[in-house]
Amino acid sequence: MSAHRNEETPLLNRQQTSSEVNNSKLFLAVFAAVLGNFSFGYSLVFSSPVLPKLRGPDADSRLRMDTGQAALFGSIYSLGAAAGGLGAMLLNDMIGRKLSIMMSAVPSTIGYLLMGGAVNLWMLNVGRFLTGVAGGMTAASIPVYISEISHKGVRGALGSCPQVTAVFGTLTLYALSLGVSWRWLAVAGEIPALLMAVLLAFMPSSPRRLLSLGREQKAEQALRWLRGRNYDTQVELSAIQRSINTQRKITWSQLATPSYYRPIIISVVMRFLQQMTGVTPILVYMEPIFAQSKVSLEAKYDAAIVGAVRLFSVALAACLMDKLGRKALLYTSSMLMFLSALTLTMISHTTLCPPSPSPLNNTMSLDYRPHNDVGNALEAGQHGSAGLIPLISTMVFIFGYAMGWGPITWLLMSEVLPLVARGVASGLCVTVSWLTAFLLTNVFTHLVDGYGLYVPYLCFTVVCVFCLLFNAVCIPETRGRSLEEIENYFRTGRTFTITRTASTVQPH
């Protein structure tokens, strides 16, 4: 009986400690960090409302773009994001997650200044590339920072915050573009990045990083600031320290062991599949896609509606993340994207296009010049309820993506990557993701030019099937698990081996 009572005492203490967590300051730190994701979402879709202005008849002659120049302006952001991901691979471990996030404000601010004051095309392209660099840095650093400062009871919900704020940034751009000129859109884009840098200066560094540097007192102060005055930090600090003590500098031979390469491959493939669903070209070219689809409503209003739907679905995913689990949401996300992409494929296959002998560039979906008489007549024939089907299908696609493959991919990347290689591996994932996005965005332009929307939509439909299968076979359920438990999942033959308290056990 005495032994039994001694075994129960630590459990009760842990439960009592858990009940005394105060997450209010943690939420403040997360808010400061995810302002970088707001800027990321804003800058990602900057080309959607801006390109029609630069392709229109009223555009400044120095800035007017042809098809190839418009495609470059739309896709060069992804190339910058890939470069930012590579930079984050080094900065995350050299200067820490927090400083890496803060440094992203530099290329973001310079990029927006260049675009806002652009008098020629190179300023627009360099500015968009620099905002992409900032986006890649934040995408690689913010999820890791949030996962390392968050209590595991709220890590799932907070892990979806980067995606929520990125979507809110996108919606903000769409809303502002309804009445603000594109130059002022660039000026407004500087504000969240600068605010993020100022607020983060007052936030603590990751306790895990501080312990890895041997700064135990600073780590304890940071953790107490994040958890509240009444929180017993020793249990969590001891767990983090044990995890750090078992880590050594990773070698190439270690990368050949399953405990390292499996989580890295899972993360890289997830980011690859996330981009191959086509979400980036759809967001970047949303207004011209709707114009080509002959949707009844004006394209800029369609884009704003889809942005609102995306924000709602990401917020819903944040609420369900720790209730339903990651895999259930990924299954739902894959099915919704598959059904909507299949519908868009069938609709675009039957959509009439202006016939030859018009030049090929005059018929491509990314041409922003006014429709000719034939195109207007065809558009009028498609008005009515059928003209809303592409809009509804796109809304379902974005809803499905934002329910699962959007936020959960970010969260799982920060959860399953090996702790010893998390900074470098997260940068690798972001780099692969954005190189894929850059290539896909350019290929999308040429596919639509040659075949219409049918072929890329068909490809996206096939990718959604692969997403479904990959989730079923390869992705683990991480709901309610600590980072140390997830690491042991891969280290010990794909089984969870750390004893869990009664307060954290959840049914599967």
Image (spheres, rainbow, N blue to C red):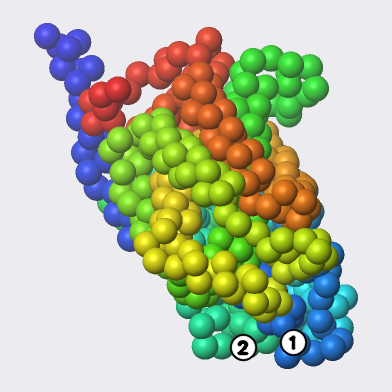
Upstream in sequence: badge 1 or badge 2: 1
Work out how far the residue at label 1 is from the one at label 2, CA to CA, in angstroms.
16 Å
Q: Position of residue 264 (x, y in %)?
A: 65, 29
Q: Where residue 57 is drawn, which disc sits there?
A: 1
For the C terminus, the quadrant is top left
User: In the figure, residue 118 lies in which quadrant?
Assistant: bottom right
Amino acid under disc 1: Pro
Please give the name of the residue rendered at 57% of the width and 67% of the height, measured from the top-left corner: 378
Q: Answer left or right for 395 relative to 424.
A: left
Q: Does residue 318 sit above or below 42 in this rendering? A: above
| Residue 462 falls in image quadrant | top right
Which amino acid lies under the numbered mark 2 shown in the image of this protein?
Answer: Ser
For residue 358, side relative to residue 242 (left or right): right
Q: What residue appears at the point 83 percent right and 72 percent down from the top-left corner?
A: 66
Percent coordinates x, y for residue 492 in the rendering: 53, 12
Q: Which mark is residue 181?
A: 2
Regarding mark 1 in the picture, which secondary structure is present there?
A: loop
Is residue 280 left or right of 224 when viewed as pictured? right
Q: Residue at x 81, y 64 (%)?
A: 357
Please say if 388 is above or below 176. Answer: above
